[in-house]
Amino acid sequence: MVKSMTTPPATKKATVPTRSSDRPNVQRPGEESVPIMKMRPTIKYEADRVRGFGREIMSVPGCEQLQSCIQCGTCSGVCPLSIYMDHTPRQVMALTRADFKNEVLRSRTIWLCASCYACTVECPQEIRITDIMYELKQRAILEGIFPKRFPIPILAYDFSEMVKKNGRITEMILVIKLFMKTSWLAALGNWRLGIDLIKTGRFSLVTEKIKHHGDIARMMDAVDDQKGS
Amino acid sequence: MVSIKQDIRIGFYVCHCGHNIASMVDCPEVASYVEKLPGVVLSRDYKYMCSDPGQELIQKDIKEFDLNRVVVASCSPLLHEHTFRTAVAAGGLNPFFFHMVNIREHDSWVHTDRKEATAKAKALARAAIRRVAHHKALEVKQVPVNPDVLVVGGGIAGIHAALTLANAGKKVYLVEREPSIGGHMAKFDKTFPTLDCAACILTPKMSSVGAHENITLWSYSEVVKMDGYVGNYTVMVKRKARFINEDLCTGCQECVANCIYKEPKFTDEFNEGLGKRKPVYIPFPQATPQVVLIDPDVCLNFKRGVLTDKCKKTCVEACGDRKAIDFKQKEQFTEIKVGTIIVATGFQTFDAKRVLPYGYGVYPNVYTAMEVERLVNASGPTSGEVILRDGRQPKAIGIIHCVGSRDKKTNRWCSRVCCMYSMKLAHLLKEHTGAEIYNFYIDIRAPGKGYEEFYDKLNEEGVHFVRGRVGEVTDWGMTPEEEGKLVIRVEDTLAGFVRRIPVDMVVLATGLEPQADAQDVRRLFNMSCGTEGFFLERHPKLAPVNTFTDGIFIAGCCQGPRDIPDTVAQAGAAAAEAMVLIDKGHVEQEPNTAYVLPDCCGCKSCLPLCPYTAITFDEATKKAVINEALCKGCGTCVSSCPSGSIAQNLFEDEEVFSEIEGVLAD
């Protein structure tokens, strides 16, 4: 999974076919490792539902509209990342509403969401899908449901901690931290890019801070307190 | 202490309405309380007052106990005031010696405390008892109904309503805004689900409208003003200048052939802009009336709509002795008097440009469904051949449903016809081109006679149905097979993944919405609109063609999206409702009208306030005069008269004040 996020989209490889009649050889990430014809029950029993989960999510301010989802699939149709998702955004909406908490929180989809808000803009029922994705990500982080060394929650956590501490982020430190906690070998492959970024001034070598950065921490704590209460 | 006239003998009845009232109000207690009130001779509670035994009870009691006033505490007067007035009249009393108290909608249905609700019922009953003592005997007046009917809008709804009435011998004025009647249906190629040709079934009806001795057809005309009341409306019709004398034109179209423009070069509205026409033209071959018209915006004899007389006028030469062309024609205003009006002003299609991701107006090969109707039509701009704007024949076509329907950002409602017409177009396009056809839908709604079977047929024909609302249409190809095509990106929700489907042509199944000027028409005819802007019927189930204004009926898509069979059925219903009034010959008027007392000082302050222009000023006596036929009993003049010299039947001061005292007394 981690590999799929760091390699460029596979579709690019397929742009030069050998014959005009060739079907593009699009190899989707992870496809080769799926064992063929392995039997596994896919049925869901009522015991698989976590009753109340859907209602809990829909009671979060901004997520109420999920109740009126008509399952049209516009969200998936406009989502630039839906091509990599195990469950399409529409399926995540359906699973959430039907209380399939484990399926939702273990889905790759919530982590792939890049918050481009295309789904929220286009949804005919005005469901704030991106906000629901955030809510689901938070639940997954709170419950610790994600693969070991999975970069996205780690990045999210370090990002907010750094903002809390300094009032803003220092990209280089954040990236180094991320690589150290996930896959430090991948950092070696990207060293040249790092040098280029430093040269062009995109990476700062010193920790950057804003004035009164303590205020940010106080604000963030206050929000946390309110959420907790 | 309350003084009730000695000779007043009131009978009081409180209705249980099954459990509707009795479950929240202690009816026997209310009855025994009212019995002790002054003037009350008799007080009963009964399970269903509106039933035949209930009504007979009132009649029997009037005779037996010599009652001269009756009060019933039950449901809303809207439901049963008429019932009880009739019962009281049958018992030998003037029906206006009756008063009704609403203890259901106003009490039992809206309260949860039985004790409080019972107390409220007592208070309301007490108020009615005090009020009814002051009631006077009143007479219901009858006003004759003008038997002529105005039908506004010459689409299939207006055509059908006009023909129904005309065949029944009624005189009908049919007013149509466009140069020809026929409406949207005239543009269609085939009709679902039977696939009979729209023109073949519509044009005979159109020509019988044109030829019918009972129908006065005014095309290219608009209603600009309406006054009056049920049975007696005065309507002003603007007849726009078409620069042709309709009586002299034979429809030979010699003028069109001889126009100084040798080739048609102006946008043809009837063909949705896909074809061209000349400045002098007939909208389509079967147009009714068969009369040409001149477009002053492009005709060389005009400049920006103003006559310059600078053209060689080859059209006038071609017309010759008929002399039908009249460049000096001005718009005319004609006043007509009718008794009833049927509004059938139809709909407009959704502007597909409003949905940006589908690229209408950006990609030339994205079409609206209406354009495709013309494209597949044998009398259309391409004679029925499906040729794209770039000259190619499509090999793959995507039809996107619900464009401007079921979308909170545009129109929330389901337009009802798009699923079916999309399937019809899918069938026709497949028949014409043999292309691969994809339908992208949210839900297929095929709930009519033979509709589901049509859906089955399409599946058997190999038309693809992809359940998913399209995310975007793009010309950005990512694989070789997508190069040079329009790519539809959609989640195949039944398969559970996102697909990219390259097509040559995209058809947008645009929804139906109210006409742009629906609000003006609504005001013109004193109607109401629902939140979405369609005209509001009086009752969604039981009065679907009536409006809140008596004598004005609605039919067709101006009331909401519907298909042709439903429209025709509704138009027939509207015609029948109009005939109820015409054949009865008169309307009864509620005597709750206002009247002027002798002490009117003639200040004229009431005149401009009356919303029904029922008040005039009598110069001889220097007093205001109220026309009872026009008065609707709104009470505006009564409350505004500075000298208190206007009173209103059923709302006399003593009636209203004693009612207020009654409700406030202990």
Image (cartoon, coloured by chain):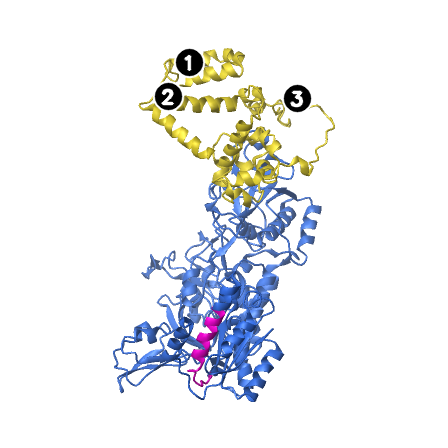
The chain holding disc 2 is: A
> What crowding class fits label 3: few (fewer than 14 Cα within 10 Å), some (14-19), or many (20 or more)?
few
In the figure, residue B167 lies in which quadrant? bottom right
The chain holding disc 3 is: A
Q: Is residue A161 above or below residue B513?
A: above
**Residue under the image location 35 percent in, 67 percent down:** B328
Q: Is residue B484 above or below residue B69?
A: above
Q: Position of residue B205 (x, y in %)?
A: 58, 68
Residue B373 within the magenta-colored segment of the rendering: no
| Res A166 label | 2
Q: Which residue is mark 3?
A: A32
Say which quadrant the C terminus of chain B sits in.
Answer: bottom left
Residue B140 within the magenta-colored segment of the rendering: yes
Q: Is residue B179 left or right of residue B609?
A: right
Tell which tag, 3 or 2, sits nearer the viewer: 2
Q: For mark 3, give the secondary structure.
A: helix
Q: Which chain is yellow?
A: A
**Which of the marked residues, 3 or 1, is nearer the chain's N terminus?**
3
Q: Which chain is blue?
A: B
**Residue under the image location 50 percent in, 32 percent down:** A134
